[in-house]
Amino acid sequence: MRRLSLVVLVLLGGACHAPAPAPGPPPPPDPRVAWAFLDTLEERTFRFFWERADPRTGLVPDRWPTPSFSSIAAVGFGLTAYPIGVERGYVTRAEARRRVLTTLDFFLRAPQGPQAAGGAGHRGFFYHFLDMTTGRRFGSVELSTIDTTLLLGGVLFCQSYFDGDPPEEQAVREKAEELFRRVDWRWAAVRPPLVSMGWRPESGFLDHDWRGYNEAMLLYVLALASPTSAVDESAWSEWTRTYTWGTFQGQAHVAFGPLFGHQYSHVFLDFRGIRDVYMRGRGIDYFENSRRATYAQRGYAALNPLGWKEYGPEVWGLTACDGPADVRLTVGARPRTFWTYSARGVSLEGIRDDGTIAPTAAAASLPFAPEIVLPALLEMRRRHGGALFSTYGFIDAFNPSFPGGWVDTDYLGIDQGPMLAMIENHRTGLVWRTLRRNPHVVRGLRRAGFTGGWLEEAAATP
């Protein structure tokens, strides 16, 4: 808590406040109202991927309606969305299957190589952003190991979901397998056993590797699972060695400020009841860790040490998202710094908070703490109506403290995806139970040292 106190002391100009007791969950909403709201939110969010993806390539824009490049992570969330649409009756299985095949075919055929221009990837990895028109590297962006991982999460989900006899479903499985086997994880482990954050043809590997704790749990599970180029098993223990454990807002958990770090891997992996060596030592699992991080954020909003408008137990949620402007202003006689896109968050490691709230931060935590998430989502919609909740569900972010108030105009694919998938995981567990059958997921978790729960049964299945 000492480091947190120093951060708050600096931000408040010398006034340090001890955390107040966190408020308990609010009264539960009417179940019929809550269920109808989730129906609406889920279908609208699904439509973002179904209607905005390029039907020729399957590429999903990074954002909309602002014209943008494609995010390969958003494509992975799109692949995750299509089977959800089948189960919900939004599209037919045949329609979803065709969209998935189109997407897989694009990535299999997209040129790979070390050249700086004209390619989509190298060594099985893909560039962070691709041009929506050409499907090639956008600008000088890096070859991204984490964004390729999120793409592969959707690929493997489709591989396990489309398990029928029709030739098209067999083709989905085979193409997904080829894409997964092509990724050269050992090449990306330039400082073994850890995996580099990325590579550029102009300058080589980035200086930093993926170290814990953040969204890269899925990356290491898949890197350990590879049947062609798996990294050494010591990668997982090296990853966990750099965790920061402590108590923030009364919640003891592994620290990471933006909530997306507690959500992205959980979109695909069911961590309930399974533990690695680190979590066995703490007596919890990663699902419980994310639940505590969610409660800690709500507790911070209720305390509201920086005095932002609307923060409280009913409205909360900090993560990577859009923001109003990169500017420093005097607001209410206090100097305030605001940002555009930034990874906002709070934890015992520090605070990055400019009053911008992202609905996805709460919504993608729905399975962890529905008793506080659902009321928050309903309240955000009630307060801001159609300005915040429109064609494809929740707009990316809003900031009531910015002069005149600010509400984003864009939807972001990497925020839409976790909302949709985690709503479905909360309601039916679809993504989790489907990927529990995937042999690559099972292999990767076991090589990382996970035991217990559903993994024991999966390990006993031929």
Image: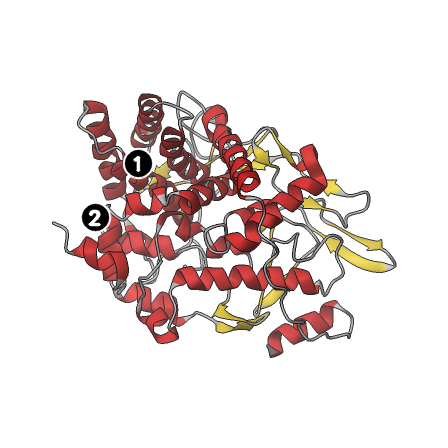
Residue 198 at least partly seen: no
Which label is found at residue 158? 1
Residue 293, image x and y in percent?
52, 62
The image quadrant that residue 354 belongs to is bottom right
Using the rendered view, name the quadrant where residue 12 is placed: bottom right
- Distance of label 2 from label 1 (alpha carbons): 13 Å
**Residue appearing at x 53%, y 31% in the figure:** 44
Instruction: Answer with mark 2 or mark 1, whichever residue precedes in sequence.
Output: 1
The disc at residue 410 is none
Circle 1: element type: helix
Most distant residue in the right direction: 333
Numbered-mark total: 2
Residue that protrudes farthest toward the left in the picture: 462
User: Residue shown at 47%/30% (left/top)?
Assistant: 49
Relative to 344, 451 lies left or right: left
Residue 406 lies, in percent from the top left, at 74, 42
Residue closer to the observer: 366 or 438? 366
Crowding near pointer 2: few (<14 within 10 Å), some, many (20+)? Answer: some
Q: Quadrant of residue 122?
A: top left
Kindly identify which residue carries mark 2.
439
Q: Look at label 2 and name its amino acid.
A: Pro
Q: Which amino acid does the dot numbered 1 rest on?
A: Cys
Q: Is residue 353 above or below residue 20?
A: above
Specify whether 457 is left or right of 380: left
* Percent of width and height locating residue 445: 27, 58
Location of residue 132 in the rendering, given as x and y in whole percent from the top left corner: 48, 27
